[in-house]
Image (cartoon, grey):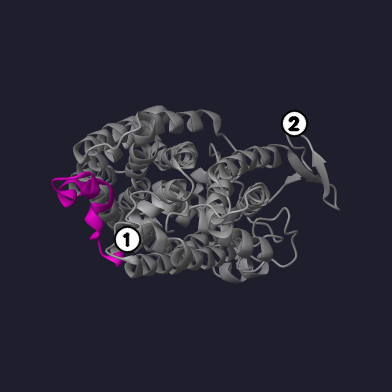
Amino acid sequence: MRALDLAIIAIFLVGMPLLGVWIGGRQKSSTDYFVSERRISWWVVCVSVVSAETSTLTVLSVPTVAYLATPEAGGMTFLSLSIGYLLGRIVVSFVLLPRYIAGDLVTAYGFLGKRFGKGLQSTASVTFLLTRLLADGLRLFATAIPVKVVLTSYGVDASYWTIVVVLGIAMVFYSFFGGVRAVVWVDAIQMLWYVLGAVAVIVVLSGKLPDGWFGRAVDADKFQLLDVSSSPLTSPYAILTALVGGAVLSMASHGADQLIVQRLMATKDVRASQKALIASGVVVFVQFALFLFIGVMLWAFYNAAKPVQDLGLNNNDELFASFIVNDMPTGLSGFVIAGILAAALSSSLGALASSTVTDVYQNVVRRELTDAEVFKHGRVWTVVWAGLLIVCAGLFATLTKRGNPIVEQGLSIAGFTYGALLGAFFLGLVFKAARQADAVAAFVTTVVVMAFVILGVKFVGPDLSLEIDFAAASATAKVLAYPWYTPLGVLVTLVVGGLLSLRHKAPADSRGL
């Protein structure tokens, strides 16, 4: 890396937080801080949603998915998941979003509080907080990967811990001072930045690849879009798994996760939020296709070499970053790395803070806080969660050495709780007699069941016989494909909660929802 590249990266790390503070302006109230008084344009929110959900995991790891894909699971089959994601967004747009915005809520879990009671609202919020802490800790660690590659190429041996601390400080700066308006606008700018970086990579790679590479990739099934032969139980990209599992996963991530819902609530009305959410599904499809194509091009460039064994990388997900640092022209290299950092600085701190104050703290103190108190506590919790994210990211850096691409690890984390969260919303909508005790029991049961399934259920042998084993999986054992985690969780929640609701003769008071 030349000094020009490092200068571009340094200017970005300093300039983006300052830009966020300038865009956010002076925050006047908690509503302004958490939902920007609901006056952000739908297209800005759309781009922000895409930036928030894909982030560094997409930029770094999706190319690795295509690079490592086998003939039985072609590189582009990951795209079938994004088709399911679009279907899930459509359901959320017309089923859940109208209830959130018409109810003038600050968090998605306020809906559960009105339908069932404060107990379930706090339970769901705490679950979201813990899940988001793990998922975003992994995302922050993912961002440290290209930074470490850059610094190593320049002779600086910085630890992952040092890198995540610096990135965490940059992220908390504009979140603290600019509120959700700064987060949404910076997300939008950053997403455009890293997409332009991806286009630059494709242009550079196209000039470095040998003649006939495209035909070889086609022969190796790298452009296979639909997987109709793999087992839906164990293959995450089998067509049934991708469409059904992807749709339900998207319903949970975009309808029951405050990280996304907070952004959608910043639009002026229901129609604007629906346009933002559905359009984001189309943008995600295009973005996935872009980075998967880069992965196939890297496969041709490195002649299918194994990243760790043949190229000497620390883990598979360093592959893309290594190409950018070592094979991109100076200037462009710094621009693309800055784009990857842009993907990382998409902040969840506002969502974590708003859920903590609105759904948990107010229920603990058992009184309505004044607007000034909510505003004050929101900023305090923004800093607290930043510290926790840094610690979590550092732990991932210590524990994660090899294995599946980190994008798959990130999606698997959500499997423990997403089903319970989404299931609680549908329980309130479908079973009119369900009470808070039914919902809490179903929620807790689902989390326990999903932990059992994710950690203990394996499929062995050519006939995929079911086996319960909490020890490390053998070389031939396979686990349930992660897109099924959320649908299974929703099913458990509805069955348990629905059966418990049969004890009640009269419908519960749904409080107008």
Q: Position of residue 345 (x, y in %)?
A: 33, 45
Residue 416 or residue 333, whichever sits in front: 416
Quadrant location, the C terminus: bottom left
Local packing at callout 2 (Cα closer than 10 Å; few below 14, some 14-19, many 20+) is: few
Point out the stretch of residues depicted in magenta: 20-43
Q: Secondary structure at mark 1?
A: helix
Res 45 label:
1
Image mark for residue 303: none
The amino acid sitting under disc 2 is Ala
Q: Which residue is mark 2?
A: 471
Q: Residue at x 70, y 42 (%)?
A: 453
Find residue 323 and report its horizontal and vertical position in percent.
45, 50
Q: Nearer the viewer, mark 1 or mark 2?
A: 1
Quadrant for residue 78, please give it: bottom right
The secondary structure that dominates the magenta segment is: helix
- Which one is earlier in the sequence, the residue at label 1 or at label 2? 1
Which of the pair 397/313 is nearer the observer? 397
Residue at left offset 74%, top offset 32%: 470
- Spatial CA distance of label 1 from label 2 is 44 Å
Asked if 179 appears above or below 247 in the picture, the reply is above
Residue 351 visible in this rendered orientation of the protein:
yes
The answer to whether residue 222 is above or below residue 56 is: below
Label 2 secondary element: loop
